[in-house]
C-alpha cells in the first residue's frame, strides 16, 4: 500500500519510556498506599533516679539525677514530667514540674530534681516520664 508509513525507531523508544514511567508510578503509588500507618514512640531512655548531693542553698533535703538519652536515629524533642512519691514534693532544679528537653542522636542530658517531704522525715525518689517526638 502506498499510504502505509512505518514508525521510526524513536516512536518505539518513546513508547518504551512511557511504559517504564507508568510502571514506576504505579509501583510508587502501591508502596505509599500500603505502608504501615502505625506510629512509634521516639526512642528515649530514662535512667532510674540516682541520689546526688544537693547544691548549697537549694533548701532541699534530697536531690536526685535522671539521665535522659536519645537512643534513636535523629534529633528528638521531649517533654519530661515529674511524679513525686506520696508525701513528697519534687521539682526540677529550676522549680518546674515539666521540663522541655531537646536531644540530638545519641546525646544525653542530666536532669536534676529536688525533693522535699510534706510534713514527714521520709523522702522517696520521684518518677520521671517523658513523651518524645522526632524533630
Image (tube, rainbow, N blue to C red):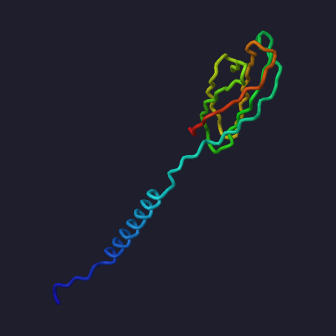
Residue occupying image coordinates x 73% and y 22%: 113
Residue 23 drawn at (x, y percent):
41, 67
* The C terminus lies in quadrant: top right
22 relative to 113 in the view: left or right:
left
Image coordinates for residue 70, horizontal then vertical, percent: 68, 39
Residue 55 image offset from top left, x and y in percent? 79, 15
The quarter holding residue 30 reads bottom left
Relative depth, front residue between 2 and 32:
32
Extreme-bottom residue of the structure: 1
| Res 88 quadrant in image | top right
Residue 42 position in % (x across, y down): 61, 42
User: What is the total number of numbered labels drawn onto the structure image?
Assistant: 0
Rendered position, 1 above or below 12: below
Eyeballing the image, is 57 above or below 5?
above
Report the residue at 73% width, 14% height from top.
Answer: 118
Relative to 102, is 29 on the left or the right?
left
Q: Work out whether residue 107 or residue 2 is closer to the camera in this orientation and state it.
A: 107
Q: Quadrant of the N terminus?
A: bottom left
Q: Residue at x 30, y 78 (%)?
A: 8
Relative to 41, is 18 on the left or the right?
Answer: left
Q: Is residue 60 above or below residue 111?
A: above
Amino acid at each position: 500500500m502506498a499510504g502505509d508509513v512505518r514508525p521510526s525507531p524513536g516512536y518505539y523508544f518513546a513508547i518504551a519510556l512511557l511504559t517504564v514511567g507508568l510502571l514506576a508510578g504505579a509501583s510508587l503509588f502501591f508502596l505509599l498506599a500500603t505502608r504501615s500507618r502505625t506510629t512509634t514512640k521516639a526512642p528515649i531512655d530514662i535512667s532510674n533516679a540516682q541520689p546526688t548531693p544537693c547544691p548549697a542553698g537549694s533548701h532541699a533535703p534530697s536531690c536526685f539525677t535522671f539521665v535522659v538519652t536519645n537512643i534513636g536515629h535523629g534529633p528528638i524533642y521531649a517533654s519530661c514530667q515529674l511524679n513525686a512519691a506520696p508525701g513528697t514534693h519534687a521539682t526540677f532544679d529550676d522549680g518546674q514540674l515539666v521540663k522541655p528537653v531537646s536531644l540530638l542522636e545519641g546525646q544525653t542530658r542530666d536532669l536534676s530534681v529536688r525533693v522535699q517531704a510534706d510534713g514527714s522525715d521520709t523522702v522517696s525518689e520521684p518518677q520521671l516520664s517523658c513523651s518524645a517526638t522526632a524533630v
